Image (cartoon, rainbow, N blue to C red):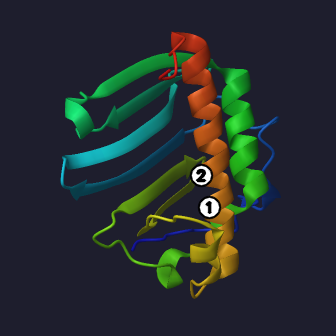
Amino acid sequence: MASAVTASAMQVEGAEYDPKTADRAEPFYVRYYSGHAGKFGHEFLEFDVRVQGDGRSALVRYANNSNYRNDSLIRKEMSISALLVQQLKKMIVDAEILKEDDSKWPEKNADGKQELEIRLGNEHISFVTSKIGSLNDVQKSDDPEGLRVFYYLVQDLKALIFSLIALQFKIKPIQ
């Protein structure tokens, strides 16, 4: 479990961080992974967002591997605008996840793990915990408040990425 924060989440070089006024080309990266090795092999969901060049766009990469019923790996890539990157940064800053520490969170286990890695300006942090089935799992942890922040931010990020994928690729649900 590696959590490394060099400064307060809302403070960057002594001033409060504001995604609206931040340099578009500043380093920004967010990656989420959830997976396990089980009966059907290595099954996982992963996505990442990485700012490109001068910050006018970002690349979103998505992968979902489920071997259930011989499903194959699904990979999608798309570009998003600086405005959407700004919104992602705002979600992360508003959640105050950069203030959290995963040392008291449940460790990865046979059920799998979740990882969240964020690079925002000079801040770089990485979280690893077990899969969270419900808020009941959050409440039972040694750090329910910190894990709750993680849980809700991950839910928000997944909802946004899934919505973007549905809009971009018009994936039809199983009927």
Q: Is residue 115 left or right of residue 143?
A: left
Task: Look at the image and tell me whether residue 100 can be seen.
Answer: no
Q: Which residue position is annotated with label 2? A: 154
**Tag 2: amino acid:** Val
Residue at x 81% of width, y 57% of height: 15
Residue at x 58% of width, y 53% of height: 122
Residue at x 79% of width, y 53% of height: 94
Q: Could you say whether the residue bearing mark 2 is in a helix, strand or loop?
A: helix
- On screen, residue 64 above or below 54: below
Instruction: Find residue 155 and report its horizontal and vertical position in percent.
Output: 63, 49
- On screen, residue 116 above or below 134: above
- On screen, residue 160 above or below 147: above
Which quadrant of the view contains residue 98? bottom right
Task: Look at the image and tell me whether residue 166 can be seen.
Answer: yes
Q: Is residue 126 left or right of residue 80?
A: left
Q: Which residue position is annotated with label 1? A: 151
Instruction: Find residue 144 and report its horizontal and vertical position in percent.
Output: 65, 80
Q: Could you say whether the residue bearing mark 1 is in a helix, strand or loop?
A: helix
Q: Residues within 10 Å of mark 1 (few under 14, many from 20)?
A: some
Q: Nearer the viewer, residue 134 or 10?
A: 134
**Tag 1: amino acid:** Tyr
Q: Is residue 166 left or right of residue 33?
A: right
Residue at x 36% of width, y 35% of height: 64
